[in-house]
Amino acid sequence: MKKINIVIADDEELFRSGIRFLLQKVANFNVIFEAENGQEIIDFISTTEEFPDIILMDLKMPELNGVEATKIIHKTHPNIKIIALTSYDGKSFITNMIDVGASSYLLKNTSPKNVIHTIKEVHEKGFYYDEKVLKIIHENIISSSGKRIKSDLDKKLLSNREIDVLELICQQFTTPEIAEKLFISPRTVEGHRNNLLLKTQSKNVAGLVIYGIQKKLIEISPDFNL
């Protein structure tokens, strides 16, 4: 079982200790660093030889807040997945974190089981958005009138196979699962995924999901209550 390196960033020591205690009970979770502000994470990443796979990121921290730290890390180390873990549940906070590159968004009052599940999903699939977050992204796309990401593109932009792969990515299937469903190799799936990133100008898999929402490849339930 592959080890998942995790960094916890939060200015409350008691909260960090509680999360560390929880995560250390999971066999393949490995907490390699704790930070009390965003600058400590940036400094750690710039000097460490063992990079984190996942960062649990609080939003409000001294020196450098979680939003700014996420923005910097997403640009310099795009392979590091960042999960917002915060007490702020407003639409503006969620939208902002997704915009700067967060792969998931969790509230601190969520269950321990959900924290563990989210870490595993993000590590395996590159993102994990629950229905509330997906709906907020969807509403934001509508209200922004296409300013946030490109509006309708040429239908010939994507091949039929690329559309098949994108639809399955949006349904949160892994690369091996997509390969099995489409009767192609995992390497071919990765090739299609890379082409999708280039063609849609998405920076990561989460960006592809947002593109999928805009193209109505993900349907958001209209009666879902926030």
Image (tube, grey):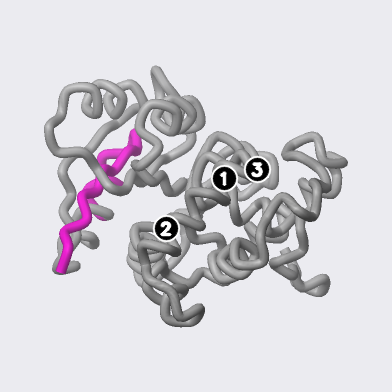
In the image, 137 versus 145, the foreground residue is 145
User: Does any portion of residue 115 appear in the rendered image?
Assistant: no
Confirm or deny contact between disc 3 and disc 2 (CB under 8 A). Answer: no
**Disc nearest the viewer among 3 and 2:** 2
**Residue under the point 22% across and 60% down:** 23
| Neighbourhood count class around disc 3 (C-alpha, 10 Å): few under 14, some 14–19, many 20 upward | some
Residue at disc 3, secondary structure: helix
Give the extent of the magenta segment: 1-18
Horizontal side, residue 105 vs residue 7: left or right = right
Mark 1 and mark 3: span between their CA atoms? Answer: 12 Å
Residue at disc 1, secondary structure: loop
On residue 99, the disc is none
**Disc nearest the viewer among 1 and 2:** 2
N-terminal-most mark, 1 or 2 = 1
Badge 1 amino acid: Tyr
> Dot 3 corresponds to which residue?
95
**Residue under the point 61% across and 50% down:** 89
Residue 140 image position (x, y, % from top left): 77, 46
Badge 2 amino acid: Glu
Horizontal side, residue 179 vs residue 53: left or right = right
> Dot 2 corresponds to which residue?
190
- Quarter holding the C terminus is bottom right
Badge 3 amino acid: Thr
N-terminal-most mark, 1 or 3 = 1
N-terminal-most mark, 3 or 2 = 3
Mark 1 and mark 2: span between their CA atoms? Answer: 35 Å
